[in-house]
Every structure is written in structure tokens, then in C-alpha cells.
Image (spheres, rainbow, N blue to C red):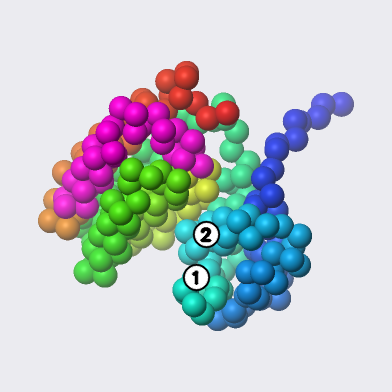
């Protein structure tokens, strides 16, 4: 008889699991407002910091909308949209990092090209807002991983290819954590994050200019550089 090693889980992942399970069972529905932070944290038996991390992840996945001063609201969704991102992202192991990045490279290079060809004016606004948010937060990289992935996810949405968007969505949580953990190393070589901002800006400008070839090239160069840096033995996340 063979057993598989149990994968360690973070508390906020259990919070995600509970909330998404309620969505699947139809106990909370699009438009519903979740209870307040303090009350929800007490109900779940977790800190408000842990709850906020879970809610930010749900927002990044497009499952909730956080309205300052109003609360957190469930967005329109379907069951596959809820289950797939969490099921796959939380099952990825460290020894699959290279394959994960190669898959991301294949998806996002094509997504950038399609975005340059198909993006609507509203997509430009979303991508530009994501880029500006990254600029505002640097050189503080506390939430850099999530902000970085928000930019890439907006590019994927601009491709108007829902399959690419959904597949990338399955990796979002795991990739953002990897980026977060390796950010100190990246910014040690990239003073104040200016190089990474330039790379993202190049991608955005190429998409905005409908330059398909350049959009693909800039995305490829950006991700290959990130992958090369990440795969250095001393840079791998614990």
C-alpha cells in the first residue's frame, strides 16, 4: 500500500475552501453581501488578517467584489469557475515549478498576441489600472505577487479567449505566492522594481498599439527572464 505525502495547507486556504463550497451549494449567490469582517472572522475562528488574505484572493480570481465602506459582494460565477482555480492551484508541488512556468509561458505569450488583436477600450483601462497599481506599491513588495498576477490576468481577459483566461486562473494563487516569495531577490537586482515595471509597460504599450508581434515578444522575454531568475537554486521558494 502506498500513501502520498499530505500537502501542507495555510489557514487562509481553508477559509477559501469554505466560502467557495458555500457558492457551489448555492447557499451564497451572486449579489449577496458577505457578513462583516469581524463577524465572519469570529464565525470562522481566524484572524481578520487571514480573512482579508482569503478575500483578496477571491477578488483576484474574480469571485467577489470588495467595495470599500460597503462590504464584500459575491460576483456572478459558475461552478467550474469556482472549483478549477482552487483545486489545481493548491495541488501544484514545488517539483512542478518548471512545468508550471513553461505552461504559463505558452498561455500568456499567445494571450498577449490575441489581446493586441482583440482588446477593447475597457480592456486597456483595466490593464493600465493594474500597471499603475503595481507602480504605486513599489518598492514595497508586500502584495507584489498578487498585483503582478492581476496585470497578467487582465491581459488574458483582453485576449477575449475564455479558455485561456480560465486555465491561467487555475494557476493564479500558486504563481502569485511564488512571485511574492522571490520578490526580495528580484528587487535586489532590480533597484526599486523599475526594470519589471518597464517590462510590463512594454507589454501594455504593444497591446494598446495593436502590435501583435511585439506584444508576444515582450511577454516572452519578460516571462523567460522571470523563469530564469526563479529557477536559480537559491531563489526557489521554501
Q: Which mark is residue 66?
A: 1
The answer to whether residue 63 shows anywhere in this view is: yes
Q: Residue at x 46, y 40 (%)?
A: 180
Which residue reaches farthest top? 233
Numbered tag placed on residue 138 in the rendering = none
Q: Is residue 58 above or below residue 140?
A: below
Tell me which secondary structure the magenta stretch mostly adopts: helix
> Viewed as shown, does residue 6 lie left or right of 51?
right
Tell me if residue 178 is in the magenta stretch.
yes
At 47% from the left and 59% from the top, the residue drawn is 60
Height in image: 222 above or below 58?
above
Q: Quadrant of the N terminus?
A: top right
**Residue 109 image offset from top left, x and y in percent:** 30, 43
Report x, y in % for residue 91: 63, 41
The magenta-colored residue range is 177-206
Residue displayed at 40% across by 43% down: 141
Quarter occupied by the C terminus: top right
Q: Is there CB contact under 8 Å for labels 1 and 2?
A: yes
Q: Quadrant of residue 160?
A: bottom left
Determine which residue is flagged by label 2: 56
**Do we see residue 167 in this rendering?**
no
Amino acid at each position: 500500500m502506498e500513501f502520498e505525502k499530505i500537502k501542507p495547507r495555510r489557514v487562509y486556504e481553508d477559509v477559501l475552501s469554505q466560502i467557495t463550497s458555500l457558492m457551489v451549494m448555492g447557499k451564497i449567490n451572486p449579489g449577496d453581501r458577505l457578513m462583516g469582517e469581524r463577524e465572519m472572522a469570529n464565525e470562522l475562528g481566524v484572524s481578520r488578517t487571514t480573512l482579508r488574505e482569503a478575500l483578496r484572493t477571491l477578488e483576484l480570481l474574480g469571485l467577489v467584489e470588495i467595495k470599500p465602506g460597503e462590504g464584500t459582494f459575491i460576483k456572478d460565477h459558475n461552478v467550474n469557475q469556482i472549483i478549477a482555480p482552487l483545486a489545481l492551484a493548491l495541488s501544484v508541488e514545488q517539483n512542478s515549478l518548471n512545468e508550471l512556468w513553461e505552461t504559463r509561458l505558452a498561455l500568456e505569450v499567445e494571450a498577449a498576441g490575441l489581446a493586441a488583436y482583440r482588446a477593447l477600450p475597457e480592456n486597456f483601462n483595466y490593464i493600465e489600472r493594474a500597471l499603475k497599481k503595481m507602480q504605486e506599491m513599489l518598492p514595497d513588495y508586500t502584495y507584489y505577487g498578487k498585483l503582478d498576477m492581476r496585470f497578467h490576468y487582465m491581459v488574458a481577459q483582453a485576449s477575449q479567449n475564455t479558455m485561456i483566461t480560465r486555465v491561467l486562473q487555475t494557476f493564479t494563487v500558486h504563481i502569485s505566492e511564488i512571485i511574492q516569495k522571490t520578490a526580495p531577490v528580484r528587487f535586489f537586482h532590480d533597484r526599486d522594481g523599475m526594470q519589471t515595471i518597464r517590462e510590463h509597460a512594454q507589454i501594455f504599450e504593444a497591446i494598446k498599439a495593436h502590435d501583435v508581434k511585439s506584444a508576444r515578444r515582450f511577454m516572452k522575454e519578460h516571462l523567460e527572464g522571470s523563469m530564469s531568475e526563479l529557477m536559480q537554486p537559491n531563489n526557489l521558494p521554501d
